[in-house]
Image (cartoon, rainbow, N blue to C red):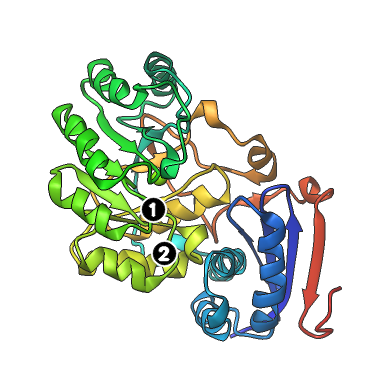
């Protein structure tokens, strides 16, 4: 097997684009999660590059050696930085094999993935929210809807008073046939979450995401125990021990993780395996249209259908920078999408769009920045 010869990073305002080159000159592209690109870049350059250069160009191997070599630094920034290199290595492996990444991850055939439209605001009135959802559904044909309720981590009101309760009631009346979900982003204490959860149950909601702060496992479990509604969580996490406690301890009914927060496709599949071991559906979190959504769709294609719909940002929530940088990005059609066909992730990066980004190059032979 070839080894990693070069790692390049381009820093965009919110995230890093990463390219890995192996000792045969084969290349693959990856990306990190949005937010704190400068800190992620420092973590990638300081923690991941020195370990990864010269290693076998194998995402499973590099995941293991980086996570173990930098065990004292485990946490979100090591996971975010690892994701950039790990996803580039899957792309490289897929391109070398002439196969889509989903096949390398164990998938057998491409399939349609049902989508829910995921709303990203708490500031709207219920009526404005319903109007916005109607417009999204007219464009994308989604059969599921997720709205935001509560106040993120209980940090204080972001929207009109009484919005959450009114929205839960109004949503069912406006969309009698859709699968309804709500995401509190950790907004409630358990007792309050159960209260609004009962209201959601009365309206036939399907799923309640992060009812309590993500580190409040006891509170989240109390909500999952009290409600018939399925409770999900895990999108903030990167610790396999915590995922295990969530899955084995009845904390959630649906286990989630975000590929770019937990360290890449290898670790995401490990979380999916944990879910399967404990008889839970697995539902990745996928916040933005970019390579992040591309990665999530490949992982979903590699897994058996869970019965859950996949998170999708609609036409009102576009990412123009990603549309200019990557092609072809996945599209929604009649409420369904598919993983982009390979090889690799199937994405061509328009390198001209990276010209203004700060680029750094690390080469195995020189062991110094190029
Ligand atoms: Mg969420």
Q: Residue sitting at 23 percent across and 16 percent down?
A: 173
- Placement of 106 over or under 286, stated as above or below: below
Residue indicated by mark 2:
268
Q: Are marks 1 and 2 in contact (CB under 8 Å)?
A: yes
* Residue nearest the observer in this picture, 236 or 316: 236
Is label 2's Cβ within 8 Å of ligand 1? no
Element at badge 1?
A: strand
Q: Is residue 205 visible?
A: no
What residue do we see at 29% from left, 35% from top?
A: 181
Give x and y (percent) for residue 174: 27, 16
Could you tell me which secondary element the residue under label 2 belongs to?
helix
Quarter of the C terminus within the rendering = bottom right
- Extreme residue toward the right, this view: 370
Q: Is residue 123 visible?
A: yes
Residue located 13% across and 43% down the image: 228
Dot 1 or dot 2: first in sequence order is: 2
**Residue drawn where x is 66% and y is 54% of the image:** 36
Q: Quadrant of ligand 1?
A: top left
Within 10 Å of disc 2 (Cα), the crowding (few <14, some 14-19, many 20+) is many
Q: Nearer the viewer, residue 311 or 78?
A: 78
Q: CA distance from mark 1 to mark 2?
A: 8 Å
Q: For mark 1, what is the residue?
A: 284
Category of crowding for the residue at label 1, using alpha-carbon neighbours closer than 10 angstroms: few (below 14), some (14–19), many (at least 20): many
Residue 252 shown left or right of residue 50 in the figure: left
Q: Position of residue 249 (x, y in %)?
A: 21, 66
């Amino acid at each position: 097997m070839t080894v990693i010869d070069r790692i390049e990073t381009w820093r965009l305002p919110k995230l890093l684009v990463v390219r890995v080159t192996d000792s045969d000159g084969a290349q693959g592209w990856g990306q990190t999660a949005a937010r704190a690109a400068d800190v992620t870049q420092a973590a990638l350059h300081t923690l991941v590059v020195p370990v990864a250069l010269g290693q076998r160009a194998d995402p499973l191997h590099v995941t293991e050696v980086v996570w173990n070599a930098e065990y004292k630094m485990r946490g979100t920034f090591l996971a975010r930085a690892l994701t950039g290199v790990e996803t580039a290595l899957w792309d490289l492996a897929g391109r070398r094999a002439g196969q889509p990444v989903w096949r390398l991850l164990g998938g057998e055939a491409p399939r349609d993935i049902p989508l829910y439209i995921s709303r990203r605001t708490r500031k709207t009135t219920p009526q404005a929210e319903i109007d916005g959802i109607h417009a999204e559904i007219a464009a994308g044909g989604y059969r599921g809807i997720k709205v935001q309720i509560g106040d993120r981590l209980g940090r204080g009101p972001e929207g009109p008073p009484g919005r959450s309760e009114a929205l839960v009631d109004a949503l069912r009346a406006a969309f009698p046939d859709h699968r309804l979900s709500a995401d509190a982003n950790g907004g409630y204490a358990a007792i309050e979450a159960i209260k609004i959860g009962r209201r959601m149950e009365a309206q036939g909601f399907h799923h309640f995401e992060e009812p309590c702060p993500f580190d409040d496992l006891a509170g989240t479990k109390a909500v999952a125990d009290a409600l018939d509604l399925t409770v999900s969580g895990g999108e903030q996490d990167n610790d396999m021990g915590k995922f295990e406690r969530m899955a084995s301890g009845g904390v959630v009914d649906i286990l989630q993780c975000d590929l770019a927060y937990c360290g890449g496709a290898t670790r995401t599949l490990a979380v999916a395996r944990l879910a399967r071991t404990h008889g839970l559906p697995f539902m990745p979190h996928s916040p933005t249209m970019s390579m992040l959504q591309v990665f999530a769709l490949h992982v979903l294609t590699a897994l058996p259908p869970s019965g859950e719909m996949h998170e999708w940002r609609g036409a009102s929530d576009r990412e123009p920078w990603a549309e200019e940088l990557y092609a072809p990005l996945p599209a929604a059609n009649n409420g369904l999408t598919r993983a982009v066909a390979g090889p690799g992730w199937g994405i061509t990066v328009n390198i001209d769009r990276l010209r203004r980004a700060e680029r750094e190059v690390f080469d195995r032979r020189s062991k110094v920045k190029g």
